[in-house]
Image (cartoon, rainbow, N blue to C red):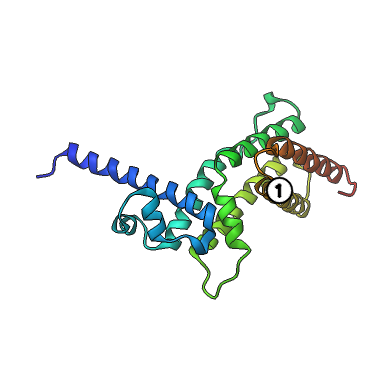
Amino acid sequence: MTGPQTTRKKRANGVESRQRILDATVEIAGERGYEGTSIAAVSAKCGLPASSIYWHFKDKDDLIAAVIERSFDTWLTAVVLPDEETGTPLERATAMAANVAKSLVDAPDFLRLGLMLALERRPTEPRGRTVFLQVRDIASRKISEVIGGLFPDLEDAAVHTLTAYAVAGADGLFVHREINGDAVDLVALFELHARSVHDAAARMAAGGKA
């Protein structure tokens, strides 16, 4: 009979194995892209047999989707507007932007892999691309909530425009860092972008043009 201690050990080993597989997939996908990632390569990197990988994940696409979800969950915790005690709306927005940038530096995989998949077209859409578009929609809604909270008088159309501008700008800054490396200060760039979005929102709320 299997006792509680044995069951807990198996569960812990399963969680550890899953993390090892995901970590290996991040490295492989970062080096070789989606097409160059394979179960065999992940197996060699993490030191677990392919059968263990298939026990956790149905196929490569399921594995890539899990990487995106894990990274996004880590990143999403940073998309929180500090409370009013933090300072002015601008100070709160730039503080959140800094946290988002730091989180992207620490957990870039969902955006790195997601953008890679989003820009490619295949006859059959990979689940990873579908998951990325879903989590991107969640992120956009979170940002819309932040903008609407800071500027409650803005019309929905204005919030939508500002959200698109904020997301597109963040994408561009992330790609810029991916191309140019760690010398790029992503936090400073995100803070500057937050100021730009804030100023545009303030002008729109006052009845001026963005």
Point out the residue furthest to the top here: 85
Q: Position of residue 50 (x, y in %)?
A: 32, 58
For label 1, the crowd category at 10 Å Cα-Cα, with few meaning under 14, some 14 to 19 and many 20 or more, is few
Q: Position of residue 15 (x, y in %)?
A: 33, 44
Q: Position of residue 78 (x, y in %)?
A: 59, 37
Point out the residue furthest to the bottom here: 123
Q: Nearer the viewer, residue 32 or 81?
A: 32
Residue drawn at (52%, 61%) of the image? 34
Is disc 1 placed on a helix, strand or loop?
A: helix
Q: In the image, is residue 16 above or below residue 168?
A: above
Q: Nearer the viewer, residue 41 or 7?
A: 41
Residue drawn at (54%, 52%) of the image? 30
Provide the residue designation for mark 1. Answer: 176
Q: Position of residue 60 (x, y in %)?
A: 43, 62
Amino acid beneath label 1: His
Q: Nearer the viewer, residue 22 or 134?
A: 22
Q: In the image, is residue 82 above or below residue 14?
A: above
Which picture quadrant has residue 93?
Answer: top right
Residue drawn at (90%, 46%) of the image? 208
Residue drawn at (78%, 43%) of the image? 197
Q: Nearer the viewer, residue 24 or 155?
A: 24
Judge from the rendering whether residue 59 lies leftward or rightward of residue 121; answer left or right: left
Quadrant in which the N terminus appears: top left
Point out the residue furthest to the left here: 1
Which picture quadrant has residue 104?
Answer: top right
Q: In the image, is residue 80 above or below residue 118?
A: above
Question: Could you tell me how many numbered marks the image carries?
Answer: 1
